[in-house]
Amino acid sequence: MPEPSSAAGSATASNAPRSLAEALRARDDESLAALLRARPDLLGPVPGDMTQLATRAGTRASVVRALDRLDRFALQTAEALAVAPDPCPYPVLESLLAGEHGASGEDNGARAELPRALATLRDQALVWGDDERLRLVRTARELLAPSAGRPSPTGLGPTVAEATAGMSPTRVQEIVAAAGLPATHDPVSAVTALTGLFTDPERMSALLDEAPAEAHQVLGRLVWGPPYGEVTPNPTAPVRWLRDRGLLLPASARTVVLPREVALHLRGGLAHRVTEPVAPAVPADREHRPQLVDANAAGQALAALSTVEELVKSWEHAGPPVLRAGGLSVRDLKRTAATLDATEATAAFWIELAYAAGLLAGDGEADERYAPTPAFDDWLELPPAERWSVLAAAWLPATRTAGLVGDQDSKGRTLSALGPELDRSAAPEVRRRVLELLAALPEGGSADPDVLLARLAWERPVRGTSALRAHLARWTLTEAEVLGVTGRGALAGPGRALLEHRDPAPLLAPLLPEPVDHVLLQADLTAVAPGPLRRALGDVLAVLADVESKGGATVYRFTPGSVRRALDAGRTASDLHAFLAEHSITPVPQPLAYLIDDVARRHGHLRVGAASSYVRCDDDAMLNEILADKRSAGLGLRRLAPTVLAAQAEPGALLDGLRAMGYAPAAESRTGDVLVARADAHRTPVRSAPVPVPDGPPVPDATLLGAAVRAIRAGDLAATAVRKEPGAGSASAAPAAAGELPRTSAAETLATVQAAALTGSAVWIGYVNADGAASQRVIDPVRVEGGFVTGYDHTADEVRTYALHRITGVAELAEEHL
């Protein structure tokens, strides 16, 4: 027999726990705190005693949550216990996982790893009992045991006893006789005899040796599951042979099932076809020089900053509207993707990242639109490395998942960027785990994504959970690369600092190029920025020219529209000439100078104001030309005076219409001054970044765990304290059932607590506080006066005062519990 599991020492039959509550009561404080840390849902609220804790640990929702967090081998161990006898000795469990003939070590490490898996199940209160009587929590057994409607993950079917339940006694006796067993006096003993045959390797082998060859083929199709098969009303001879001897038992009128005992014999005693006791290794697929990884990641980080800045600035004048159900429309997502020169999936990631960092939000207006927040302006003032730190720090814990954009929810509705259905609470844990696996590789090493996904699937194998985690892991690898957390698939230095809760900015700053204060003007009306521009230069150039291409160097193109945009922003032609001459290391090309002068000469010649709107111009010939142009028909123009035209269109539409006709109008105020369009015209009110959705209750800290353990211990002391039976010389409280408060008269209560204060003994009281909450407590009274009793409360582990009129009853403790 193998040595007992190291998870918990083997207990003798005399002191073995008889319930999960007793098993929990036998734990030390450290082990109890470990349980509450692993399953924080057990703390909401703090259980009153061990019985409440055990009851809560066995609820379906809590058990499902605990099973979801088991690794593959711990889950396989629980699945094996679900099909094992209850209770199950350790050697039986070991044979289910390692086979009956694996002593030579050819069991893939299952025997060596079983103590660890069993310790995990015990630590999480999914298994209790000593190594002679291992018990799986009843709810977990119900979830993992096979049934007709829900096959077991092991592929095993029901036992002979379960499959024959409801079968006629005559039919059971016919099976016993056909199997070569003597007849019995009742169906129970017949089923026991049949079970004994199927679990006896020698007799079972002899029976199968008599089976036709085709019968072995039938068993081979069912042995690893599913164990159910359909049969016709007139089955073939091999199926009849198996059915007559109970090797196949009827599950319904047209289906048969392979009994569990038969399947285990055919499997060599294994509960699983493939046992995976050891986590798949994640080796380095490729290795790069760490300096190359960091440089590559820094380039990606710089591009990320540029992309986010471009995205947010593109929404600061007329951001996209917020859908009624929340989120961004498909059309606006496509428009943003075109602006960023990226795919829609990539654009959705940048949008969600800016939103998670608090740089974008809805403006809260009646016709709500997305716009930059005031935090965006503060973010722009930070050094580049610190700006990247803000983005990375928002990405790692975010539960909003951009990879879901474009998918459909359970009701068939398309999930939109910035929509309300993108939160996945598992996302932060998966991101961090992916980075941890990369961090475990040699510095500069990258992993094969498929191997990494296999490791994650082993760590969380529950179907549904593992599928989502696989998607999240793939998205993490892509997002980490474009954000600059990784470079060439390897974790970069700043990414490692982020993972270790250190500020990555000091590591990233030396890797980023210094901003430049100049551009190279070219004769084809373009300007080349040889690196990241200083903020003042970049802001002006972004208004004066359009970005044509990005990369190591950014190319800007000057157009009539871009020059007019700069003039609309309050710049004059002389300002623009001086700006370009100051910041270009090449002479200002003549075509560019001509372009600025030409647009400036015509800029503001026409004036548009609000009447509904009007056009004003000193040149009546130009107004005549506009009226004669067929393209102006939709503007609703008519002459009011030689130099004024009235329009039915709004001022903005009138400006756009005239510009489309080739003119360069300027908007003017009520006083006739030219209106200047500022780049930072629209900001939302102060908005906070979205709060990640927690994945269940938060993990309690050490202080809370210590307080919870003390409270449970104290409550358990009060609930399990042995009281004296009522009689002479003791309070005449009737024996209280579990959970019931003692009941005594006011006079008896006063006399008992006074006597306890005089003798220094402890008493058990029932107490109802001002809120009506009832509780049981064990106290050592030290003073009784003025209608109150003061004493040391073992439940609260402190001295407290209680009103006598709120004590429902009192009882003395038995002498051995004083």
Image (cartoon, grey):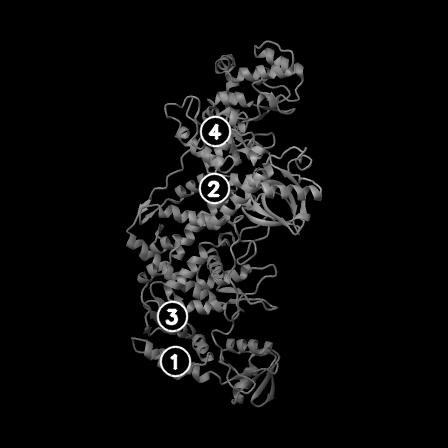
Residue 477 seen in this snapshot = yes
Residue that appears at 31% across and 49% down: 443
What amino acid type is highlighted by mark number 1? Leu
- Residue 292, quarter of picture: bottom left
- Dot 1 surroundings within 10 Å: few (below 14), some, or many (20 or more)? many
> Does residue 379 sit above or below 296 in this rendering?
below
Q: Position of residue 133 (x, y in %)?
A: 51, 26
Q: CA distance from mark 1 to mark 3?
A: 15 Å
Tell me the residue that label 1 is attached to. 576
In this orientation, which residue lies closer to the viewer: 377 or 515? 377
Tell me the residue that label 3 is attached to. 556
Tell me the residue that label 2 is attached to. 34
Q: CA distance from mark 4 to mark 1?
A: 77 Å
Q: Nearer the viewer, mark 1 or mark 3?
A: 1
Evaluate if marks 4 and 1 touch, with contact meaning CB atoms under 8 Å apart: no
Q: Specify which label sits upstream in the sequence, 4 or 2.
A: 2
What numbered label is drawn on residue 687? none
In this orientation, which residue lies closer to the viewer: 133 or 691? 133
Q: Specify which label sits upstream in the sequence, 4 or 1.
A: 4
Q: Position of residue 668 (x, y in %)?
A: 53, 83
Q: Nearer the viewer, mark 3 or mark 2?
A: 2
Q: CA distance from mark 3 to mark 2?
A: 60 Å
What amino acid type is highlighted by mark number 2? Ala
Tell me the residue that label 4 is attached to. 272
Q: Specify which label sits upstream in the sequence, 1 or 2.
A: 2
SS category of the residue bearing label 1: helix
